[in-house]
Amino acid sequence: MSLSVADPQTSQTPTVPADRTAHEIIAAARTVKAQQPPRAPFRSAASLTLLSGLAMWASYYPLNFSPLAWIALVPVLMLIRLRQPTRRMSLACYLGGLAWFLPTLQWMRLGDPSMYVAWLALAAYLAVTFPVLVGLCRLARTRWSVPMVVSVPIVWVALEYVRAHLFTGFAWYLLGHSQYRWLELIQISDLVGGYGVSFVMAASAAAMASLIPIGWFSRLKLLAPGVAPIVGVWPSSRLPTFVATGLVLFTLGYGFVRREQAAFTPGPRVGLVQGNFVASLRLPEENYGRQYLTHMKLTALAVREQPDVIIWPEGMFRWPLTSAPSGLSDEELQQLAPKAPPEFWRDTSVRETLTKESQKTGAAIIYGIPCVDLQTDGSIEHGNSAVFVRPDMGISGRYDKMHLVPFGEYLPFHDTFPWLHKLTPYPADFGLHAGTSTSVFEYQNWRMLPVICFEDTVPHLVRNMVHSASTSPQGDVDVLVNLSNDGWFHGSSGLDQHLITAAFRAVECRTPMVRAVNTGISAVIDGDGAIREPDVFIDGDKGGRKTSKDPSTGRWYRQLNAAVVSTVPLDARGSLYVSYGDWFAMLCLMLSLFTALSAFLPQNVKQPI
């Protein structure tokens, strides 16, 4: 009988006599460990990952240098090629992730002092992207001899997919989002979602990383003295280049064909009302009237352009729309809801106001408004809602936001840990009630599907809503309508990224989107994902602005009172993504999970290529 200790240099297995004492065996093991070649220094790996992290940050707003995104991952991917990891490689990768997400997400802190914690926590969570990417791809290489040009895009898409779902999801800053202006490239989103663009870009970065000469690794001190040469990524270094080039050419070819197939037809003429009010957790009620009058003034300016539908931002009609079970006496209402007088539930002034304004404008109006509903069991449900009002029918539809923002609209685990509210600026009864179904607003021949706030950044949510609504007997959805309040973020880069992320929903679903956003950026997005210049841009602050972008900088205006009027371009093209969902991203996730589980399999003695 003998015990085996693997030699890291030769992969030979020296035998240890069974009659040796435990002390001798331990001493022998320590001798083998001491003979292991030294690892490359931590600073060498950290410099590469920090370079990747900062390049990823620069690829998005506020710098918006999107071409950099194609090579941003190359430095961190070089670590996958090393036969032996550097010292504390995982920590180095994590620091690179922090270098990406800490500055990228800094706009989150602007909403409220309490949001500093959320900013730091989210950045700390997302920073695991780099170490997991490098770890899984190195495992795929050593266990299964999978080249980087295959493993990197698969693992990257899997991580983006997990990020879009875990902890209610955060599908912002996907790699493909950086290319929102390259319309031909992003058309593949109607096949596999925006993840497809990320896949192509990650494969291209892996191919470039595979071409880095060995001499560069030595100059960067990534190869410690005595360490075996770096591992190749394929028998021929040309093959990764051919694979990545083929993916890019196929994606662009598909994009050109799909854009040629577009035959946009005029849809509803919409008026997007955009107030300029900084959001706050504690808005004094005396400000309600000022906000209402401002939005009414902007509505009046938009009406001059004869829109068919007028849209207010999320929550900008401040007084709640109430409802209670019918047939209850004042005493029964008081018993069900002792904190509110019966008059609160019986007041019809809000309904009458909404109907009158629609009739005066001669247009349908979609209001962002809070709704309060008394249930028969005495519970009171607060909804973040979009209410549809027609000039001929009054209130004819309502949608309650389904995908609530944790800590912003509800406290996770509040029922299990009621003391959590003491750690927040919210009252004990804080929390909205999530809606349970989609709602389609129909007017004339158009079917409009509302989504509220950050719902337009969640790909699977919008896809499921469009799929559900389109399979009804009434037919396809014509327009996505987003109502948002980005006044929390004080004109920061978060406004730009919100708009960019929403543009991918229009491509994925082949459905145009219109966005009415407090403080901006309100816009019309066509089915190709193009963010269109409006037919009419009304500067409510009388600053002389005639377009949605500053001509001198090319950047969108924000933090101003405005109204945008445009005719929506309807899109008759279908979408495989709507039909089949995230099959591609799920496949990438399953392959990545299999790779992770393979770490627990017996060691493969075959040397990787």
Image (cartoon, rainbow, N blue to C red):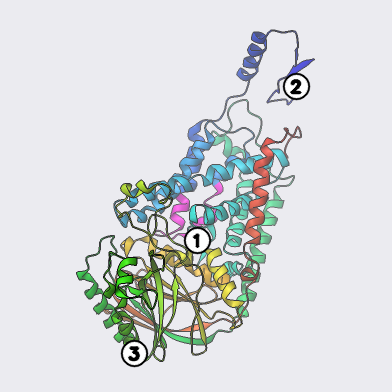
Q: Earlier in the sequence, mark 2 or mark 3?
A: 2
Dot 2: element: loop
Q: Earlier in the sequence, mark 2 or mark 1?
A: 2
Which residue is tagged 3? 361
**Left or right side of 516 for 592:** right
**Left or right side of 156 for 394:** left
Instruction: Give how far across and how far down residue 112 sits, in percent.
Output: 30, 55
Dot 1: element: helix
Distance from the alpha carbon under mark 2 to that under mark 1: 49 Å
Which residue is tagged 1? 178
* Residue that extends furthest to the left in the rendered view of this protein: 286
Dot 3: element: helix
Instruction: Give how far across and how far down residue 84 sits, in percent.
Output: 62, 32
Instruction: Give how far across and how far down residue 275 sits, in percent.
Output: 30, 74
Label 1 crowd (10 A; few <14 / some 14-19 / many >=20):
many
Q: Which residues are magenta?
A: 54-74
Q: Is residue 65 magenta?
A: yes
Identity of the residue drawn at 57% across and 51% down: 159
Q: Earlier in the sequence, mark 1 or mark 3?
A: 1
Q: Is residue 296 visible?
A: yes
Which residue is tagged 2? 13
Identity of the residue drawn at 66% across and 30% down: 228
Label 2 crowd (10 A; few <14 / some 14-19 / many >=20):
few
Instruction: Give how far across and how far down residue 40 sits, in percent.
Output: 55, 30
Identity of the residue drawn at 32% across and 88% down: 356
Label 3 amino acid? Thr
Q: Nearer the viewer, residue 315 or 605?
A: 315
